[in-house]
Amino acid sequence: MSSGLKQRIATALLLAGVLVVVLFALPPAAAVAVVAVVVLAGAWEWAGFAGFLRNPARLGYTAAIAIAVLAAWRFTADAAGLAVFLRATALWWLLAFAWVVFAPTRGGRLAAAVAGFAVLVPAAVGLARLALVEPHGRMLFFFLIVLIAAADVGGYFGGRSLGRYKLAPRVSPGKTWEGFAAGMAGATLAAVFGAMVFDQPMTNWLAACVPVALLSVVGDLVESMFKRRAGLKDSGGLLPGHGGVLDRVDGLTSAGPVFLLALQLIGVAA
């Protein structure tokens, strides 16, 4: 096992331990606070994609994201507002997918800055409100992370062992169709297990979880697109073996709000 992989695994295990404590040993408000901290750290890193390299500019961009999150939180305080917000977010991710596929080199610094709001603000609201779903919100939050981790791990090892055909060479040259297929297989197995844990009809649960796993890949590719355009290998260096915060949560940014929407559509969340 390479030293880089060992470091990656060690960091992942540490983060997993922190996550378990936050979700299952602390009040729900702790999970909301952690989501806020992670999103603001992500905003600081995303500022680099938009060309805000000096600390005052990064701080201003991060503050603007924070204000937008607070406004969106108020807008989604009732069920109607949340429904509109989540559907608009799902539409954005469909457009983002088209952006990655058809025009990954289009758009400048302003587009990158605006995209940061479209990625991070819904992620903050969706993940925080998911954690507050009664009575199993934090368990559902944990399952979402397991679902995305299964897709990531399957994609990583499937791509390394079988990868041949590039998935999105203009955006993320390391990703392959074989890795993608292995990742989706891993996510599907995780979803089958989740249906049993949450005692949900298998068809409905898979219909909710598999598209979410697919969108987690889109979130990954969108971040890779902006990193590549900014000439960055990683979004930051905070997490040894993983790069920056965004490098670790890119799949969650797209999957979080859409998972909450999917849970509403199948009647698991109000």
Image (tube, grey):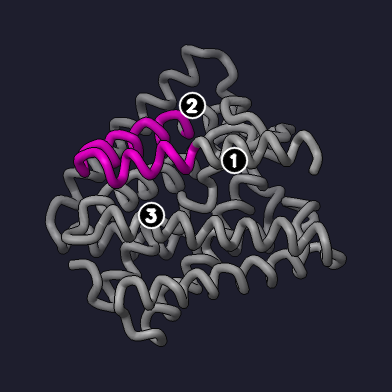
Q: What residue appears at the point 30 percent right and 70 percent down from the top-left corner?
A: 263
Tag 3 residue: 142
Above or below residue 188? Residue 253 is above
- List the single residue furthest toward the right: 164
Q: Earlier in the sequence, mark 1 or mark 2?
A: 2
Residue type of the residue flagged with mark 3? Phe
Residue type of the residue flagged with mark 2? Trp
Percent coordinates x, y for residue 147 in the rendering: 49, 62
**Relative to 270, 228 lies left or right:** right
Q: Pointer 3: residues within 10 angstroms few (<14), some, or many (20+)?
A: some
- Badge 1 marks a residue whose secondary structure is helix
**Relative to 166, 22 lies left or right:** left
Tag 2 residue: 44
Q: Earlier in the sequence, mark 1 or mark 3?
A: 3
Quadrant in the picture for residue 87: bottom left
Which region shows up in magenta?
A: 15-42
- Badge 3 marks a residue whose secondary structure is helix
Tag shown at residue 83: none
Q: Considering depth in this image, is 104 or 10 the residue closer to the camera?
A: 10
Mark 3 vs 2: CB contact within 8 A: no
Percent coordinates x, y for residue 6 in the rendering: 71, 38
Tag 1 residue: 247
Q: Nearer the viewer, mark 3 or mark 2?
A: 3
